[in-house]
Image: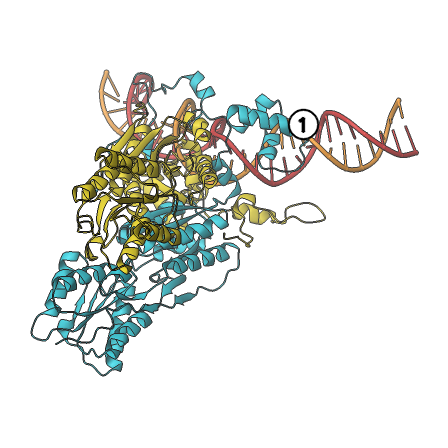
Chain colours: A cyan, B yellow, C orange, D red
Amino acid sequence: MLVATSSYNPMDLRIPVDDRTGQHIVAETARRSENRYGNRPTMKDVAARAGVGLKTVSRVVNAEPGVTPDTERRVQEAIDALGFRRNDSARVLRKGRTASIGLVLEDLADPFYGPLSRAVEEVARAHGALLINGSSAEDPDREQELVLALCARRVDGLVVIPAGDDHRYLEPEIEAGIATVFVDRPAGRIDADVVLSDSFGGARDGVAHLIAHGHRRIGFIGDMPRIHTAAERLRGYRAAMEDAGIPVEDGWMSLGVTDPQRVRKAAEDMLSGPSPVTAVFAGNNRVTVTVVRVIAERGRPVALVGFDDIELADLLEPGVTVVAQDAAALGRTAAERLFRQLDGNLIAPERIELPTRLITRGSGELPPAH
Amino acid sequence: MLVATSSYNPMDLRIPVDDRTGQHIVAETARRSENRYGNRPTMKDVAARAGVGLKTVSRVVNAEPGVTPDTERRVQEAIDALGFRRNDSARVLRKGRTASIGLVLEDLADPFYGPLSRAVEEVARAHGALLINGSSAEDPDREQELVLALCARRVDGLVVIPAGDDHRYLEPEIEAGIATVFVDRPAGRIDADVVLSDSFGGARDGVAHLIAHGHRRIGFIGDMPRIHTAAERLRGYRAAMEDAGIPVEDGWMSLGVTDPQRVRKAAEDMLSGPSPVTAVFAGNNRVTVTVVRVIAERGRPVALVGFDDIELADLLEPGVTVVAQDAAALGRTAAERLFRQLDGNLIAPERIELPTRLITRGSGELPPAH
DNA sequence: CCCGCATCTGACAACGTTGTCCAGGCTCTA
DNA sequence: TAGAGCCTGGACAACGTTGTCAGATGCGGG
């Protein structure tokens, strides 16, 4: 954890005080000529310089009608000369909308979230809104802290990839009109729009694909079942096995391991032992990468299907067969839904599931080896 | 390009007007009970409910001293009952600092920017600031538009990965006190802090590595030389060749190609033709990936060193040797420098170059094939 | 020459918060 | 018990912008 040791403490800005008098040290002259944004001219300054009224400047800045070309020119010159830039904070306070939306995701460094985030930004941009974002680092408390900070900023809407499973803290915010859409995982204990990939169906199809290629002893390595997507993928695995009439043995499943070291151990255990699996279904992209490594180190080929595409998967030997989600489509769909809420088309909260796509590249089509 | 067709038009919010009278339709009662953030209680409401003064509520909210426990409890109850949340827009207007910094990058979907962006966010978080970001899509106009929008929001500082090469438009902003740090590429025509990777040295070392393994006919595929990093890498290539006394032939260099199709063509041309190269130096990660594909398709092995690491590079056969930049370190260094500016340690603008690291994995150590 | 009308302009309040400053109540001491 | 001093609480202005509305200006016609 990083700790700031600096004096920049934005939310508790201290103003230097004279010990004897208790007066601010900032000189009176300074207070008049400088405002706290460094030394920025305001509309008042522009008005004074152009010899017009405050409101006329506002009209020019906002391209409102009712200003003669000559006046407009004078104002524009003053604006350029002073380097004036409208203060959107004040504007926001007055108008009530911030033209910004918040995006809370799990980890920007995860390649899955890049395209998602980019898609959200693209939609926001098309609607003239800026994106404020932060990562929850998979920590429910941090998620809540972030979301509430964004609400305090009065973002117009929120796109949230939830880390926690209880979002009742958002009720007053939604009540107060902050549009909200959850992505990738559903909201907990509140009724809200959700955009998901079909984790259950994707996993079931992926496992069925392995079964179709002759496998019966199939391992599953996934995240903590507390995470909705992980639970759904596990359910998909079980469903496919059950459909094929294959009883699942305990040693075939590894749940809740996340760090590479332990995933590695779990994979190795499955692949050795008395009744080794001949194929593995990997519950997410990080697991897939680790399993690819483990398999590469062993001579014997093992079939593999992973959930989530990974870059360069086609260049590996064999290529990695995956159940791909469309991260960009998730982000786009969520953001569009958000703006539809903002347009006032208040529709009942909905759960949208986007289909996944099985991409066969070789690793999922290997026959069982004994 | 996405186009918004919605009525959500945040910066030009129209208020419904009665055609006959020109009066706002919003009823007087509504105006009193609802403010424009949906229906949010203000400190005034909390004060009324708790039976205390406005400033007392402010004190409680900001944990300022001078409130008796009993009063504090009453205020806190009112806050909870009403679901009050402080309006940071108003706070920002009053205090002058926004506790947010802007990050302008090129493309969030590029895996290089994930860790960078995450590092910036981490530092911002440690300093209690939020991150507002946007992508320039490599378009100078869009970069300027974004930067100015962020300035209008009065972000406290800016981290910019520049797309353009003229940043004089930022002069009044920097003058006005907006801290600014450029990353990955230098600022154009203004004096500002810059944090870079040592593109020249990295490329030179990478090419020298190929030369050390016996190559003399070495190709270079890079981005437009208008981009500073691309020019520097090209310079590094030339320097290494010159140091080894190898004259560079025209057909060995491909500059300015970016889309995969054309990179592919360029690579194929170099590898066939009358005097084919035996090794390729790839100027960035996208080029590297394409070249890996091209080489994989041809039977004959070709040596390759790429600038920028790529995921799974170690799993390919052979592993891809790269000159790695530390994206996270770039972001962290830039953000820390930004906050040092904000702390008021106004140091002269500096140019910081972070070293690159050659990671050998096999593809760069292949001997020349004839 | 004056009135009416349309057009342009600016004074003013309000948005929700925080800094300043003073009033009133309390405690403590002489 | 009175006075000094401290602590708590609240009235008020200010931050920079925009909406309202009334006043000023100019023009044309009678």
Whether residue A15 sits left or right of residue A225 in the image: it is right
**Percent from the top left, x then y, of residue B163?**
41, 39
Q: Secondary structure at mark 1?
A: helix
Q: Residue at x 52, y 24 (%)?
A: A82
Q: Say whether residue A252 is left or right of residue C1.
A: left
Question: Compared with residue C22, is residue A93 higher up or lower down, i.e. above or below?
Answer: below
Q: Residues within 10 Å of mark 1 (few under 14, many from 20)?
A: few
Q: Is residue B38 above or below residue A45?
A: below
Q: Residue furthest left?
A: A274
Residue B51: image location, x then y, percent = 42, 41
Q: Using the rendered image of the protein, determine whether residue B234 is visible from the camera's viewpoint.
A: yes
Question: Mark 1 — residue?
Answer: A70
Left or right of residue A211, residue B226 in this image: right
The front one of B73 and A337 is: A337
Which of the 4 image quarters holds residue A263? bottom left
Residue A53 appears at what percent x and percent y? Answer: 61, 27
| Residue type indicated by callout 1 | Asp
Image position of B307 with respect to A53: above or below:
below
User: Depth check: B261 or D30 in front?
Assistant: B261
> Which image quadrant is residue A202 in?
bottom left
**Horizontal and vertical percent position of residue A2:** 22, 40
Residue sitting farthest toward the front: B274
Q: Residue at x 34, y 25 (%)?
A: A15
